[in-house]
Image (spheres, grey):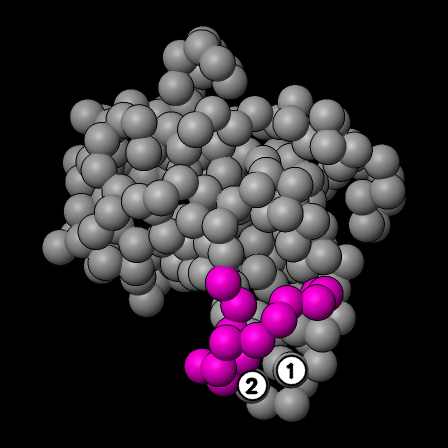
Amino acid sequence: MQMHVDGLVASGLDHAGLPGGGGLQPDPRLRQPWLNCEDCHDGAVPDLRWDDVKVLFDPEVNGALPDVVVERTTVEDWQLLLDLVRAQGWQCTYSVGGEPTELTSAAGMAEAAHAGETPELRVRPVNDMLLIFRMYQVESIDFDVDLRELRGQERLDVLMDVFRLIGRRLGKSVLLSAEGSPDHPDLGFDVDADRVVLLVDPNDPYM
């Protein structure tokens, strides 16, 4: 399944009306990328090569469910995410407090979260890739990636496409870190670079 930002325009989801207005600000946690590949663009050379980063996607190293976060978000950002999932036609199921229910809007998710429940959206961009979004708070979009289903260059490319789609739609960085280590991201979508970059040396990810 190929996913490109062009699909957003075709679906009527362009960059107009992004919350916050003005220019896009880089995430201060995105430090100088460890890998700087000038030829990494959509549809050409992959942003990341599996053989270079596969250790970061090893469940024994980063845990089976590494953490992904988009910070400084609003209800509007969550709604943009839901609209993106629907526009891409990704399979998804929704539950609140473990009970399956109908997903209406991000505002409804926020009401449930404020009531002490945990809204959970399980998304499959492709059949054998699972992303689990949980609204712990409106101010960040948190989700897990199941590494037990992510092996090889093809699936890595799909995940990086997802990061780019989310990052471009929200105009924000998307950061992935080892399970339980949210303050030390391994890689992420860099808004300024408009691509996914490595933030650590994969041979020494905890340097």
Whether pointer 1 and pointer 2 mark residues with C-beta atoms closer than 8 Å, the reply is yes
Q: Residues within 10 Å of mark 2 (few under 14, many from 20)?
A: some
Camera-side residue: 158 or 184? Answer: 158
Camera-side residue: 57 or 10? Answer: 10
Camera-side residue: 43 or 23? Answer: 43
The segment highlighted magenta reads 93-106
Amino acid type, mark 1: Ala
Mark 1–mark 2 Cα distance, whole angstroms, equals 5 Å
Residue 156 relative to residue 75: left or right = left
Which tag, 1 or 2, sits closer to the chain's start? 1
Residue displayed at 39% across by 19% down? 46
Residue 163 in the image, given as x and y percentages of width and height: 50, 39
Residue 113 in the image, given as x and y percentages of width and height: 62, 81
Residue 24 relative to residue 68: left or right = right
| 98 magenta-colored | yes
Q: Which residue is mark 2?
A: 117
